[in-house]
Image (cartoon, grey):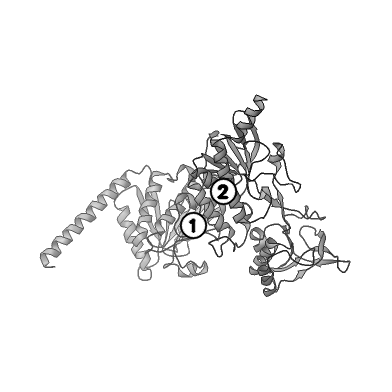
Amino acid sequence: MNQHDHEEQHIHNHELEAQAQAQLKALFDNFGRQVPVYLFAGSEKEDQFGHASRQILESVSGLTDKIKLEVHGLDHELADKYQIRHAPTILFDPENYHIRWMGAPLGEEARTLIETLMLLGHGDSGLSAQSRKVAKQLDSPREIKVFISLTCPYCPQQSINAVKAAMARPDLVSVELVDIQVAPQIAAQYDAQATPVAFANDVLIARGAQPEELFMLSLQKMEPQTVFIPDSDAEEVNCDLAIIGGGPAGLTAGIYASRSGLDTVIIERDALGGQVATTPVVENYPGITQIGGKALVDIMVAHALQYVQIFPGEEVMEVSSQDMFVVTTSRRRFRCKAVLLATGASHKKLGAPGEKRLAGRGISYCSTCDGPLFKGRRVLMVGGGDSAVTEALHLKNIGVDVIMAHRRDKLRAQKHLQKLLSENGIRVLYNTQVKEIKGDAQVSTVVLYDSAREKTYEQPVDGVFISIGYQPAVDLANKLGIELTQQGYIKTDQHHRTSRPGIYAAGDVEGGYKQIVTAAGQGSGAALSIFEDLVSPYWAGDEEKTARG
């Protein structure tokens, strides 16, 4: 390139820069309020990032009087007031919001600076309606840290998610953006080597950039979320099929019913996925060698959401029928042509003295939920099936000292799982029953009876985990007068039809093998039967016969 070409390129770049500045000035001048920005920096010789931050912020603030910049050292009284300990640190409108940035708006992060100023200038978080609903549900403080890097193209998205949260709930949410190059020691403390990564109250809530709604949900739930289910304000929903229960059977049925052409909804009062969501590790689902139960549930829910609308957190209060079924929940009504009961089953209780009183105070039915609380402590796992052994192995893996108690002389669990018990040094107390669980404020001991030796003794423990089977959720079936089996499960025919026309059942509530793949298969079968019956109702023929007498 000759000298003439160099001069033309320089003029072109200068024109582009002038155009960009003019566009920014027009945007900033349109602010509805002034945005105070404080930069705390060290000496220019010692603080290269601080020097760069000062240059950028002075250039930006110089475009408009709507951005008021103040630059101070760490020895200034404002640094003490706002507890600034590191340079450079940028504060945005600190009298109204809790937004700080430990770093410099260089590289990719220049986008974060401009968008943050835009949001503050207009005084609106810019959250979607669904995200605002989630933000309103926050009921305790959230101190967010987002670790970022100036070379990361995904970081601005997650940074702005955090800024929006802080603006939506300034009463509860604070945010600190931390550049891992500016503050490597802090990044190492949080093991934040791959950006972006977000923490709330020092708990990991997200790795990588997320859509806004997922970030807000992760912030609310205080754990990483991969599926966001939009809320609905509808008071009444019309559909072909209402599925009550969002476990593997219900989710699979939703997919198959919708793909058959039925307008379908899924209603779930508790956590989606049922028992699978609290299973530590799933190793027997076809096509997936090993996966966490919650991760498998997320995959299923994400798949189902492509076809059906899901209504979580809604308890079904009543199912009535006239010309159509009316399913009344704690929030709305659903009018439908058929109902599928996929209500699953819950953990059985021991019925031992002390169990009810100490539930949640050392007694647990979910190792995934409560296991980490017992790290380094001794617990008793009661049960002898696959679930009990799997949960015992999970507890051992996370650092819990676990022993098992089983009332028979041999376990019912798969041989593979029994072998893992031995390999992990987990002791099994055979022919042993729990007679009582003792403790004042917390579990302290269990009274055990060894039937082989006819001996009763006490075993000191810090907790008791119970996995002895399931109780089918048949409350709705009972209200509807649906026939049950001798074991207490919903009685169905080969088409998953119950004793009441138009109402079907699938999954663990039907009995049989308590396996994920089995429940999914029952859900698909029920959905296909429902489709065929709605096209040609089997009960219509019976009514015609009855009418003819």
Question: Element under label 1?
Answer: loop
Q: Answer yes or no: do the residues labelled 1 and 2 have beta carbons within 8 Å?
A: no
Which corner quadrant holds the N terminus?
A: bottom left
Q: Residue furthest top?
A: 548
Mark 1, Cα crowd under 10 Å, few <14 / some 14-19 / many 20+, is few
The kind of residue tagged 1 is: Tyr
Quadrant of the rendering where the C terminus is positioned: top right
The residue at the point 47 percent across, 58 percent down is 176
Judge from the rendering whether residue 280 lies leftward or rightward of residue 262; answer left or right.
Answer: right
Residue 481 location (% of width, % of height): 72, 36
How many numbered circles are shown?
2
Camera sees residue 35: yes
From this view, report whether residue 214 is shown above or below residue 455: above
List the residue tagged with mark 1: 82
Q: Which mark is residue 547?
A: none
- x, y percent for residue 217: 52, 50
Secondary structure category for the residue under label 2:
helix
Q: Residue at x 68, y 38 (%)?
A: 499
Q: In this view, does 389 lie to the left or right of 172?
A: right
Residue at 56% across / 54% down in the picture?
297
At horizontal 56% and vertical 62% (from top left) the residue drawn is 291
Q: Where is residue 290 in the image (x, y as percent from the top left)?
A: 56, 64
> Which of the two marks, 1 or 2, is nearer to us in this view?
2
> Of the residues shown, which amino acid type is indicated by label 2?
Ser
Most foreground residue, 147 or 217: 217
Estimate how packed mark 2 is, as few (under 14), some (14 to 19) or many (20 or more) residues with alpha carbons within 10 Å: many
List the residue tagged with mark 2: 524
Q: Mark 1 or 2 closer to N-term? A: 1
The answer to whether residue 375 is seen in the rendering is no
Image-quadrant location for residue 313? top right
Distance between the Cα atoms at labels 1 and 2?
58 Å
